[in-house]
Image: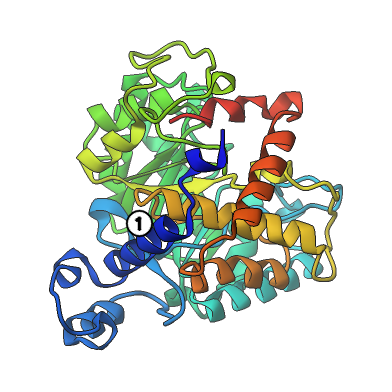
Amino acid sequence: MSVSDWNLSRRSLLGRTSQAALAAAIGSEVLAKAGESPATTPAADAQTRKILNYHPKMKYRRLGKTGLMFSEISLGGHWRKRDGGRVWVNFAKDEVPQDVAQNRLEVVSRAIDAGMNYVEAITAAECLAYGVALKGRREKMHIGADDHRLGPRDFANCTVPRQIHNVEECLRRLQTDYLDIWRVQASMEGTNTDEHIDVMVEAAEKLKKDGKIRHFGISSHNRDWLKHAIDTHPQIEMIVFPVTAMTRKAGDPVAKENLVERSGWDNANDFTTSIFDSIRKHQVGLVTIKPFAGGQLFKTPKKFPVVGVGSKEENDLARLSLQCILTLYDEITCIVPGQTTVYEVDNAARVSYMREVAMTPADQQWLEDVTRERMARLPADYRWLRDWDVI
């Protein structure tokens, strides 16, 4: 993949980021009106008042047909564990350790101050920790949640009563009455059937009727399964999948090293159509994960509690990766990087605050070189991520 393939020239970066930011912040109707500065129009003021936890420096994008406006940089559910791992699964007796509670309180507070307004929680531990951190300020954040142990990744859980129980357990641990998004975690490999999706949809409709969720989405690590799901089930309002700085849209020139084997769904090995086409067609919101390949882009292992501001190289790599992804893909509503420290929150927020400032050619080349080298040596349990090089 060459620098020119990434289309990150100063002119294209400025043009794409400026248009995307305005469209997200004030809506296409206002953007289409020539003349006044959008920031000072009554219509723009009315739009920003509707954005939860609005910050004038943060940029916001519409979550598809939900109508919700999310900060384009939001807060991922994961943060580093004591052993250096990336996912806290559960806590003994459902009690959040004091140091963990303090860390999440500080990180969430900084995220709120920065204008972030969406947080994900996809394990029991994450629901508990974010429930504690958001206590007394639930109205500052949209919440998307699920419990992977109770969800339809286990086919035995593919019944309506069990999925309602799944959501009710999330609500209990989060100490809230409703989820803005039930972003149910389907099989990562794309092995759930259409009947399983029907069960998820039926449960979602019942949960909406009872006021326990507002919107319904699905996550998976299988591109073709997700495309099939949104093409066949209009009830799906948003989806979650990984995007890295290596990712490119199908239909663009495809490098030989990006050709991978896919199987199992109608569009397997089809590099002429993109899941982005279905996202636009069905007005589905898109939240993207793993911008840093689950931390594999970074050389320095981190263990909880992480202290200090981190290395300049890793901060720059994180910032440029986020900038690249947001600049190239207007279809993305937001990225939810895991953020272990307040310094990581500041670094991520800066991406949105300063995105109109184009990358230098040197930054572009460095990002490409480092990303290519580290993605080429992903460990075995992360090599599936290369299946998302072309989507």
Q: Residue at x 85, y 50 (%)?
A: 300
Q: Judge by depth and name the residue closer to the eye, 83 or 335.
A: 335
Left or right placement of residue 330 versus residue 386 in this view: left
Q: Residue at x 28, y 35 (%)?
A: 277
For the question of whether residue 338 can be seen, the reply is no
What x and y, as percent, mark residue 296? Answer: 73, 41
For the question of whether residue 115 can be seen, the reply is yes
Which residue is label 1 attached to?
212
Location of the C terminus (image quadrant): top left
**How many numbered marks, from 0 up?**
1
Q: Amino acid at mark 1?
A: Lys
Could you tell me which secondary element the residue under label 1 belongs to?
loop
Q: Judge by depth and name the residue closer to the eye, 189 or 391.
A: 391
- Tell me if mark 1 has few (under 14), some (14-19) or many (20+) residues whose alpha carbon lies within 10 angstroms of its own: many
Left or right placement of residue 382 versus residue 14 in this view: right
Q: Judge by depth and name the residue closer to the eye, 327 or 138.
A: 327
What x and y, as percent, mark residue 150? Answer: 53, 37
Q: Quadrant of residue 62?
A: bottom left
Left or right placement of residue 366 versus residue 119 in this view: right
Give the answer, above or below, for where 32 lies relative to 35.
above
Q: Quadrant of residue 258?
A: top right
What x and y, as percent, mark residue 73? Answer: 50, 63
What x and y, as percent, mark residue 58? Answer: 45, 74
